[in-house]
């Protein structure tokens, strides 16, 4: 049964290359040995030499052309046997051609077929050599024949030993090749599994809107990719630092000591500030020399690191730091990989952050909607509902007076009419504040004027308007937000301020739109009120802050006990 077929072409090429040696050296050594010896058959020697050179040239050409079928190997094997015996006879039984050309025949048979076939070829070579010797010398006695076969016996012993050695070597090589192939396949399988894991993580990273998942995937993909590129066996420390508060905090980490997880840095240290300013992945060395990073106990033994800023446009979210205790552990290839991961990840991080902000904004809108519903319910209960209940009670009283005191009925009806008119105004004012149509048709100034006119009818304080003509400076969203802030502020004034005067101001200044509501009431403790908002049933002040943020504005409240309250909202017109 044939074996080692993948090695055939290489074996044939090697044997053809080595065959030139005995074909050239055999006649040279025969002449140099003794030029006067008549036993050397010159014609046979030259014929064998040129014939061997010819068939080896043909074999070499066939191998070069890539056309070398099994039958050609069989032919060469038979020719090697014939030529080895012929050279043996032509050179007066010299062992050199027998041990070389015969060896090639044995090698072909052993490598292409089985060791037993190679040994059989070795016996055939020896038998043919002995038979040729006996026929050439004409010996008939057993002793003489045995003496003539002695060189052939030595040759066959050498060839058999060579066949066994070659077979053992081929088995060892085959096992080594199989083992290496299995290891290579295992490595390829592991690499493929890791590559698939990296691909799946990268796909998940590009699609995720989960903020926590995005920042964790950045480190996981980076560390796995470094492992594929042959990073040092010692586990590197990985950290993702994000800006928050007054510095940078550890958002997520790998192989970081527990005591380092809550540490923060300013981000102004030599390494961090320089790497972020460079706006590209940087290899840094000797982290222990940096006073800022040296705060992390996990980094004190690190000799080299990759530092990659997380930037989108002009916005810097933070940085990725991967550090190793091995000096010069990272190459440019490692840096490019981590940089590529971070470039992809920062977009996912931005999307996740925007999505989280949208969810937070949605929650705020829902809270504001629920607060508006609760406020409307309270206003209806405290205002028109109470007034309508009072009207119903007074109607019953009037009915009773019709029989007991008819003269007082007219007076009661007049008061009842006034109460009904006041209730109607309250309801209209509430409806107006819910959706002031004039705001969309005539603008914010007209809406504020109409709103305050309605409010002034029942207010026990004086409303002063200082309104600048706004023209087309404000979009409808900014006008709606400004009107809602005025409405919220005036609701608080009516309920809590106990003031005599209120000033409402609208102005444009330096590309800013300013809304201000000021009263001369009793004021309040702002910090205490904000601190106890979780115990209150109203979110009025928080609404003032949140609504301004809807148009990228800012609300400031200045107040103190006994000194009134001023609420100022500033919205940039060039946002």
Image (cartoon, rainbow, N blue to C red):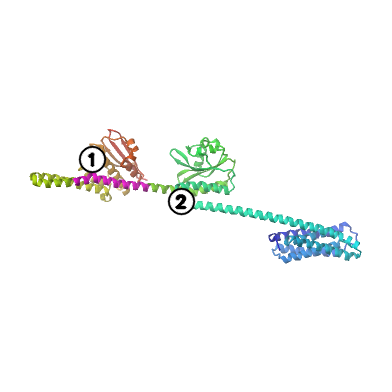
**Disc number for residue 373:** none
Q: Earlier in the sequence, mark 2 or mark 1?
A: 2
Q: CA distance from mark 2 to mark 1?
A: 53 Å
**Disc number for residue 463:** 1
Chief secondary structure of the magenta portion: helix
Task: Where is residue 107? Give x, y as percent.
Answer: 76, 59
Classify the position of the C terminus by image quarter.
top left
Question: On screen, 124 above or below 214?
Answer: below
Residue 371 inside the magenta-drawn segment: yes
Question: On screen, 254 above or below 62?
Answer: above
Q: Is residue 489 left or right of residue 204?
A: left
The residue indicated by pointer 2 is 208
Q: Please tell me in which quadrant of the rendered image residue 47 appears.
A: bottom right
Task: Where is residue 446? Give x, y as percent.
Answer: 25, 47
Question: On screen, 143 above or below 259?
Answer: below
Q: Is residue 191 left or right of residue 8?
A: left
Magenta segment: 361-389
């Amino acid at each position: 049964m044939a074996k080692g077929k993948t090695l055939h072409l290489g074996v044939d090429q090697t044997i053809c290359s080595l065959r030139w040696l005995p074909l050239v050296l055999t006649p040279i050594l025969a002449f140099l040995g003794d030029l006067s010896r008549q036993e050397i058959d010159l014609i046979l020697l030259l014929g064998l030499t040129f014939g061997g050179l010819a068939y080896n040239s043909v074999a070499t050409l066939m191998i070069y052309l890539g056309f070398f079928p099994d039958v050609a190997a069989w032919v060469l094997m038979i020719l090697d046997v014939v030529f080895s015996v012929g050279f043996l006879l032509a050179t007066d039984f010299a062992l050199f051609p027998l041990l070389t050309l015969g060896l090639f025949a044995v090698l072909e048979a052993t490598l292409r077929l089985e060791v037993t076939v190679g040994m059989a070829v070795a016996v055939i070579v020896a038998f043919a050599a002995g038979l040729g010797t006996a026929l050439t010398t004409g010996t008939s006695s057993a002793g003489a024949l045995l003496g003539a076969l002695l060189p052939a016996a030595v040759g066959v012993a050498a060839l058999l030993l060579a066949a066994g050695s070659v077979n053992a070597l081929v088995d060892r090589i085959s096992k080594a090749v199989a083992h290496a192939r299995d290891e290579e396949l295992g490595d390829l399988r592991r690499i493929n599994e890791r590559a698939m894991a990296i691909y799946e993580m990268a796909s998940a990273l590009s699609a995720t809107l989960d903020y926590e998942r995005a920042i964790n995937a950045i480190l996981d993909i980076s560390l796995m990719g470094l492992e594929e590129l042959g990073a040092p066996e010692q586990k590197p420390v990985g950290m993702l630092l994000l800006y928050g508060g007054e510095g940078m905090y550890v958002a997520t980490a790998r192989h970081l000591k527990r005591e380092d997880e809550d540490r923060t840095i300013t981000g102004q240290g030599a390494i961090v500030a320089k790497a972020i300013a460079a706006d590209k992945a940087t290899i840094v060395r000797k982290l222990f020399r940096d006073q800022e990073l040296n705060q992390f106990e996990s980094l004190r033994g690190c000799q080299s690191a990759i530092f990659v800023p997380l930037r989108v446009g002009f916005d810097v979210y933070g940085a990725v730091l991967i550090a190793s205790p091995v000096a010069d552990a990272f190459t440019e290839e490692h840096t490019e990989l981590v940089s590529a991961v971070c470039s992809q990840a920062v977009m996912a991080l931005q999307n996740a952050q925007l999505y989280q902000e949208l969810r937070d904004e949605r929650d705020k809108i829902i809270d504001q909607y629920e607060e508006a519903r609760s406020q409307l319910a309270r206003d209806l209960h405290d205002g028109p509902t109470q007034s309508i209940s009072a009207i119903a009670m007074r109607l019953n009283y009037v009915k009773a007076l019709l029989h007991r005191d008819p003269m007082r009925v007219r007076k009661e009806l007049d008061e009842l009419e006034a109460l009904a008119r006041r209730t109607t105004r309250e309801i209209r004012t509430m409806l107006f504040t819910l959706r002031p149509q004039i705001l969309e048709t005539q603008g914010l100034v007209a809406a504020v004027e109409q709103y305050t006119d309605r409010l002034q009818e029942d207010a026990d304080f004086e409303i002063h308007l200082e309104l600048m003509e706004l023209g087309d400076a404000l979009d409808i969203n900014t006008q709606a937000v400004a009107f809602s802030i005025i409405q919220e502020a005036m609701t608080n004034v009516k309920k809590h301020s106990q003031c005599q005067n209120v000033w409402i101001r609208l102005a444009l200044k330096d590309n800013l739109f300013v809304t201000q509501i000021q009263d001369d009431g009793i004021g309040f403790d702002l910090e205490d009120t904000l601190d106890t908002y979780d115990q209150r049933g109203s979110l009025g002040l928080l609404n003032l802050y949140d609504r301004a943020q809807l148009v990228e504005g800012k609300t400031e409240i200045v107040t103190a006990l006994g000194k009134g309250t001023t609420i100022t909202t500033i919205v940039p017109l060039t946002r």
